[in-house]
Amino acid sequence: MNSGILTPKNILIAFSIILNCFLIINVVGMLHFFLFLSALTNVGLIAYSISLLRYQSTMRKDVEAIFKTLEEYTDHLDEVFSLESFYGDQTIQKLIDHSRQVLNDIVDFEEEYYDDVEVEEEKYDDTEENPPQEDEQ
């Protein structure tokens, strides 16, 4: 099976199109031919624009799904970090910080490429729950 552009079928189609163009020019004239060619080009460009818009919509949905998944992952890490057995573990804390950085990068990407993005700003408290008490004298 030939998968290239220069297959016998494609060559025959191209030859047929060229031959039909010359026949249309001889029958109806140059002006009508170029009018037809212009209309055909406009229809092709409209179809291409619609396909690009559909592709952009799909890409946007995929980015939103990735963002949601990473946000759920960060929330899960926060839950694990808050367990008594893991509280204060630096490895998990670094994972949480890295997850937040990745989420911020995705938010920046969305803000740059999508106009109508509403960003929920979450305020994370990076301080310990029980700060050390000052010694009373």
Image (cartoon, rainbow, N blue to C red):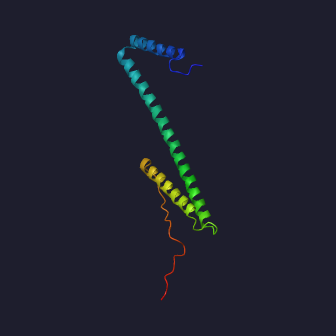
Residue 128 vs 114, above or below: the answer is below
Horizontal relation, residue 85 to residue 38: left or right: right
Residue 18, horizontal then vertical, whole percent: 44, 14
In the rendered view of the protein, which quadrant contains the N terminus? top right
Horizontal relation, residue 76 to residue 107: left or right: right
Q: Report which quarter residue 85 is drawn in.
A: bottom right
Q: Residue at x 35, y 18 (%)?
A: 31
Q: Residue at x 38, y 22 (%)?
A: 35
Q: Residue at x 55, y 64 (%)?
A: 90
Depth check: give the residue in front, 51 or 73.
73
Residue 124 vs 34, above or below: the answer is below
Residue 100 vs 126, above or below: the answer is above
Residue 117 vs 30, above or below: the answer is below
Residue 28, horizontal then vertical, whole percent: 39, 14
Residue 74, horizontal then vertical, whole percent: 56, 58
Depth check: give the residue in front, 119 or 75.
75
Q: Residue at x 48, y 39 (%)?
A: 53
Residue 50, horizontal then vertical, whole percent: 48, 36
Depth check: give the residue in front, 61 or 31.
61
Outermost residue, right side: 85
